[in-house]
């Protein structure tokens, strides 16, 4: 007959051995995937505003955007945006506006990435009413995170005039764009519209507080680099000369890295 003390010792050794074997047989933890590096793209976007607050008429604006990643000891992206007014109310004019430039460092995180850098406004407007007439400069940063089918994040920029004629009004604005997107089947997605919320530090007021939705489709096959989207948003800030509703359509081409 086996002594009770020997039986207890055998069970204790077996109990300690089995979990150790289980832990040894477990596969190593899968590392968190690193987000894909930002891709170069070009896009063209049309904004149609059927009405304005306290002003009659409608307008159409075309935004040309581009992004170019580059590496210089770290990962960076260069972005630009050029607005072109193609139609306007009777009292306004058409033509190109001020050019917006962004130079951003990209830092990968566990589930997303940070963007940090500067934005510059170049007075390229063809008419005084289409631009500020001043060079403006300020910080820009943002964050984007992936959680299953959800993409969450924001992008913020502030710029203030630093060079320009004294006859033109100073510039001081902060803009923030919240981002919420839900990926669906077959390349479809829904989410918030661009929603560029703008505060004017010169006039101390919110000039744009838009709320809207976006529907997008990413094409496969021969059109795989192409994404098309439609947005509709309403500006909740009652500022004279600001659009009430905006309908935005966009075509975006992703280029090979």
Image (tube, grey):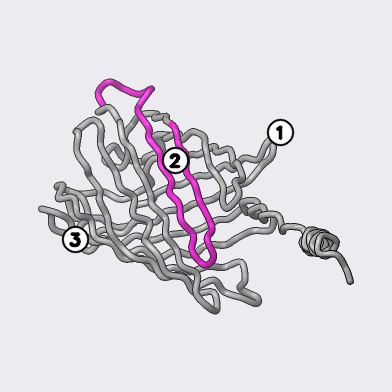
The local crowd at label 1, few if under 14, some if 14 to 19, many if 20 or more residues have their Cα within 10 Å, is: few
Q: Position of residue 29 (x, y in %)?
A: 72, 57
Which residue is the site of mark 2?
Answer: 100
Of callouts 1 and 3, which one flags the residue occurring earlier in the amino acid sequence? 3
Indicate the quadrant containing the C terminus: top left, top right, bottom left or bottom right: bottom right
Distance from label 3 to label 2 (Cα)?
Answer: 25 Å
Q: Nearer the viewer, mark 1 or mark 3?
A: 1
Lateral position of residue 89 relative to residue 180, left or right:
left
Q: Observer-nearest residue: 211 or 119?
A: 211
Residue at figure coordinates x 38%, y 32% from the top left: 159
Of callouts 3 and 2, which one flags the residue occurring earlier in the amino acid sequence? 3
Task: Name the image quarter holding residue 106.
Answer: top right
Q: Position of residue 175 (x, y in %)?
A: 35, 42
The correct choice, above or below, for 188 with respect to 103 in the image is below
Distance from label 2 to label 1 (Cα)?
Answer: 25 Å
Looking at the rendered structure, which numbered label has been put on residue 239? none
Q: Observer-nearest residue: 88 or 7?
A: 7
Asked if residue 20 shows in the view, the reply is no
Q: Secondary structure at mark 2?
A: strand
Magenta stretch containing residue 2, yes or no? no
Residue at figure coordinates x 56%, y 47% from the top left: 113
Lateral position of residue 141 relative to residue 243, left or right:
right
Which residue is the site of mark 3?
Answer: 51
- Examine the residues drawn in magenta and state their main secondary structure: strand
The local crowd at label 3, few if under 14, some if 14 to 19, many if 20 or more residues have their Cα within 10 Å, is: some
Which residue is the site of mark 1?
Answer: 73
Q: Position of residue 104 (x, y in %)?
A: 55, 38
Q: Nearer the viewer, mark 2 or mark 1?
A: 1
Magenta residues?
139-168
Magenta stretch containing residue 165, yes or no? yes
Residue at figure coordinates x 59%, y 43% from the top left: 77
């Amino acid at each position: 007959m086996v002594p009770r003390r020997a039986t207890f010792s055998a069970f204790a050794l077996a109990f300690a051995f089995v979990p150790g074997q289980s832990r040894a047989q477990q596969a190593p933890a899968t590392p968190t995937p690193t987000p894909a590096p930002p891709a170069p793209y070009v896009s063209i976007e049309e904004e149609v505003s059927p009405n304005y607050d306290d002003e009659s008429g409608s307008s159409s604006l075309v935004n040309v955007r581009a992004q170019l990643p580059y590496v210089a000891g770290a990962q960076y992206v260069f972005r630009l945006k050029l607005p072109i007014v193609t139609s306007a109310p009777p009292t306004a004019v058409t033509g190109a506006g001020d050019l917006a430039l962004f130079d951003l460092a990209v830092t990968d995180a566990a589930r997303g990435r940070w963007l940090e850098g500067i934005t510059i406004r170049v007075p390229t407007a063809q008419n005084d009413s289409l631009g500020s007439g001043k060079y403006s400069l300020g910080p820009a940063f943002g964050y984007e995170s992936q959680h299953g089918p959800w993409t969450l994040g924001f992008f913020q920029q502030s710029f203030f005039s630093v060079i320009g004629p004294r006859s033109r009004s100073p510039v001081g604005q902060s803009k923030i764009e919240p981002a919420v997107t839900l990926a669906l089947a077959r390349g479809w997605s829904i989410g918030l519209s661009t929603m560029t919320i703008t505060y004017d530090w010169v006039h101390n007021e919110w000039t744009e507080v838009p709320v809207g939705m976006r529907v997008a489709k990413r094409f496969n096959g021969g059109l795989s680099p192409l994404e098309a989207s439609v947005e509709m948003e309403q500006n909740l800030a009652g500022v004279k000369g600001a659009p009430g509703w905006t309908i935005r359509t966009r075509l975006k081409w992703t280029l090979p890295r």
